[in-house]
Image (cartoon, rainbow, N blue to C red):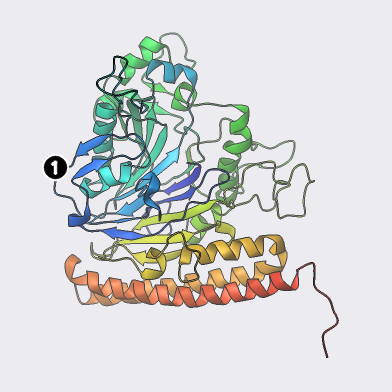
Amino acid sequence: MPCTTILVGKLASYDGSTIIARNEDSPNGAFTPKRMEVVLPDEQPRRYKSVISHLELEMTEHPMRYTSVPNALPNEGIWAEAGVNERNVAMSATETLTSNERVLAADPLVVFKPGKGAPWESDFEPEVSGGIGEEDMVTLVLPYALSARDGVRRLGTLLESYGTYEMNGIAFSDVDEIWWMETVGGHHWIARRVPDDCYVTMPNQLGIDSFDLSDAEGEQRDHMASPGLRAWMEENHLDLTLRDEGEPTDVFNPREAFGSASDSDHVYNTPRAWAMQRQLNPRSNTWDGPDADLRPEDDDIPWCRVPERKVTMEDVKRVLSLHYQGTPYDPYGPKGTEATRGVYRPIGINRNGQLAALQLRPYVSDATCAVQWMAYGSNPFNALVPLFANVDEAPYYLAKTDDRVSTESFYWTNRLIAALADPHFGACTADIERYQMKVGSQAQAIIAEVTRDVEGRSLGYEEAAGELEQANARIADMLQEETDTLLSKVLYTASMGMRNGFSRSDG
């Protein structure tokens, strides 16, 4: 699943929160409807079966309530994607990653094999289940994770036991830490803690560019890995890091060892990391021209870096909506040529399905700590709205998505706005920007007001849930009204631009 991720450490964020955020994008030619829900403990499956891999698992532990952003149509499984549980542990899964032939030869992916024939036939072959994948990970891990580290360990155990049929990156956070986990082949994995003063950019490519095996095998202060990773790497000659003779081999570059740097990466993946870092560190490097320090197709764009100023939620939304504004690569811009505009895959693309930004605030109680920001549809045309995660039910406007196009659904209304506004980008931009500003400011004001009220009355986690659910309903009502207003304006602009118009009126 093509996606884009940004992770923001607590010392790099504007208010000391940990923030993990990701666009979930559909494959080319597809638009997967999304919705938001809250999964209560008695709704969590106790016997789980993957639709894609046919893997069946018994879930024996008692689950926690958690938020989720599943597919609206369950034909391919749940695909829960992002959420926060009762312990204020957040998870985003997954960012599809690249690999290389050497890794996949050394530890092949665990792919479902359908059966052949009938049991009574001589050539009968029973089906063989595959491993776990993006469809499964949030459902199998988030209801049970006690911390970000615990989430990594739990998913790691599943990968070691059952394997995976795809390469993926997974983010875990709590109020103190963010961990980024990458699968390596069918069963191996690595995870690195995001430095508190840094942000991370991830564009569908295996991204970690430095890893300390000794820490992963010892204290696990900042690194974790599957057991036996070092021996497996040595056996298969996977470490490509150049060292002086006698230099320790504990630190290596996973991007070189496990990832890829193909021609398609240079068009589809690496330019997105370049665009995000160009936005958040505009003066740290020369980004444009023949003397640029970093170019869109460079393979050494850093995995993490310190921003030039603290990162806000508006920054998160902006970088996950980028279409190379201010460069010759912007499909909507005046710079460049027909050949350069659209040459690189945008972050804010037509097939964005949902954006979930999970913010864990350290300066409030557990009751109001977790805020799940949500947007649906193509990000250049939508708004990102905050919602409290400590609730038992998601607002109808964000939860009611099915296969019927309807303006009663936030998902479908955003899809309509984007499709109408795209051919009239310049004419619609001002209305869209005003909408984004109005929705964002009003929603944040409600979050702040209700947080003060709940904190002032010292409501506990369970006591506060009803109050927070009402606050989410207020935000959703405002959101629907403003989104309908924007749709009306965009529809008018698009209608006036129809080619069968004529200036003379009847009468």
Q: Residue at x 51, y 47 (%)?
A: 26
Q: Quadrant of the C terminus?
A: bottom right
Q: Is residue 465 left or right of residue 485?
A: left
> x, y percentage for residue 350?
59, 53
Q: In this view, does 353 lie to the left or right of 72?
A: right
Residue 81 showing in the rendered view:
no
Q: How many labels does the image show?
A: 1
Amino acid type at circle 1 is Thr
Q: Report the residue that reaches farthest toward the right.
A: 504
Q: Name the residue under label 1.
A: 60
Front one among 487 and 453: 487
Q: Which residue is drawn at 21% across and 55% down?
A: 43
Q: In this view, does 410 lie to the left or right of 170?
A: right
> x, y percentage for residue 185?
39, 24
Give the structural element (helix, strand or loop) at label 1: loop
Instruction: Say which quarter of the image contains residue 115.
Output: top left
Q: Residue at x 72, y 36 (%)?
A: 291
> x, y percentage for residue 347?
57, 48
> x, y percentage for residue 461?
19, 65
Front one among 314 and 35: 35
Front one among 413 and 117: 117
Q: Which residue is drawn at 69% across and 52% down?
A: 326
Instruction: Say which quarter of the image contains residue 472.
Output: bottom left
Residue 288 showing in the rendered view:
yes
Q: In this view, does 480 lie to the left or right of 494?
A: left
Residue 146, placed above or below residue 297: below
Residue 184, placed above or below residue 437: above
